[in-house]
Amino acid sequence: MQPLAVENIEELRRQHGIDDAELREAISGLQVGDSVNLTFRSESLATSRETLPVRITSIRGQSLQGTLARKPATKGLEWLFVGAPFEFTTAQIHSVVPRLERVKRRSGKPLARK
């Protein structure tokens, strides 16, 4: 296994003067089974970074656990596999995958609008 880091997106936003209240609100409503995007970075290849969905399997305050939901396409991260377990914090969440988007991806069919 190669050295891997999950970027602290909250700190990066803070450094650039970005206050994302909408993301904080979405994070506060997360439940087991929801998916979030995390940015993975190879520590051995500086240019190898990719944002990937992770399905949440456990939430304990600001500490979460989840499994990788999609295989990366980026060189340096290709050894990661779907289902790989990860521990992460709310500060590392890049974005929350909308619930309707997850349903559409699972079924492979567009959602009917009423």
Image: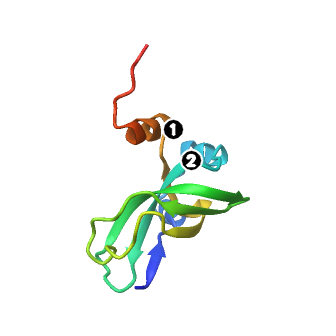
| Residue 57 vertical placement versus 46 (above, below) | above
Mark 2 element type: loop
Cβ–Cβ below 8 Å for labels 2 and 1?
yes
- Quarter of the image containing the C terminus? top left
Q: Calculate the distance from the C-alpha at mark 2 to the C-alpha at mark 1.
A: 7 Å
Q: Position of residue 28 (x, y in %)?
A: 66, 47
Q: Position of residue 55 (x, y in %)?
A: 53, 55
Q: Residue at x 40, y 35 (%)?
A: 104
| Residue 110 vertical placement versus 12 (above, below) | above
Residue tagged by mark 2?
A: 34
Q: Residue at x 63, y 47 (%)?
A: 30
Report whether 11 appears left or right of 82.
right
- Quarter of the image containing the N terminus? bottom left
Which residue is most to the top?
Answer: 114
Foreground of the two, 5 or 67: 67
Mark on residue 99?
A: 1
